[in-house]
Image (cartoon, rainbow, N blue to C red):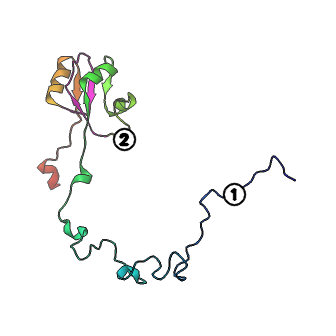
Amino acid sequence: MENSGSFNIRPPKGAKKKRKIVGRGTGSRLQKTSGRGSNGQNSRAGGGVRPGFEGGQMPLYRRIARRGFSNYPFKIVNIVVNLALIEKKYSDGETVNLDTLKAKKIIKKRDTHVKILSQGDFTKKLTFQALKLSALTKEKIEKAGGSVVIPEEVVVTSEEVKE
């Protein structure tokens, strides 16, 4: 009795493979040497070479120099933002800082180092806070009537060091 609604569950084609039986006489495909070739290191039980072995040639991991210090992991990459883009996204009287740049999606949330460059025309009166600026950018901002506020860096005097 065959039910039209039943499912015939079978493994996919090629999932059930016959086990390879080696070294069982000349009638089998894998006779005598069992597919390992005639002689040599790889034909023996436990044979083979260690990873990285190059037949006696000086291996790559020993040829490459392993000296010195790289500052690459500590490299600071500044995200470049041009004045033309700020001109487009901001209106008069607004403040440009890291938070507002992220809010307006000019930079990504993970970006922490931004430098403003002077490419493009700039006419808006904006306040720039705690950002790196090129000299020409600062000039353009002040010419347009804006201002640049850089937080005062802590300067340690020699008298404070003695205390």
Tell me where residue 153 appears, x and y as whole percent: 20, 40
SS at badge 2 = loop
Going by the numbered disc 2, the residue's amino acid type is Arg
Q: Quadrant of residue 105?
A: top left
N-term-proximal mark, 1 vs 2: 1
- In the picture provided, is 17 more to the left or to the right than 130? right
Does residue 30 appear to the left or right of 126 in the view shown? right
x, y (%) of residue 40? 35, 82
- Quarter of the image for residue 17 reads bottom right
Q: Residue at x 15, y 23 (%)?
A: 139
From the viewer's side, name the closer residue of 139 and 109: 109
Q: Estimate the spatial distance between the alpha carbons at disc 1 and disc 2, rounded to whole Å.
A: 50 Å
Left or right, 66 with respect to 43, comes to: left
Q: Residue at x 26, y 17 (%)?
A: 125
Q: Relative to 17, is 146 above or below? A: above
Disc 1 secondary structure class: loop
Find the residue positioned furthest to the front: 27
Pointer 1: what residue?
10
Give the magenta-colored segment's residue range. 112-133
Residue tagged by mark 2? Answer: 110
Q: Residue at x 13, y 47 (%)?
A: 157
Residue situated in front as seen by the camera: 160 or 106: 106
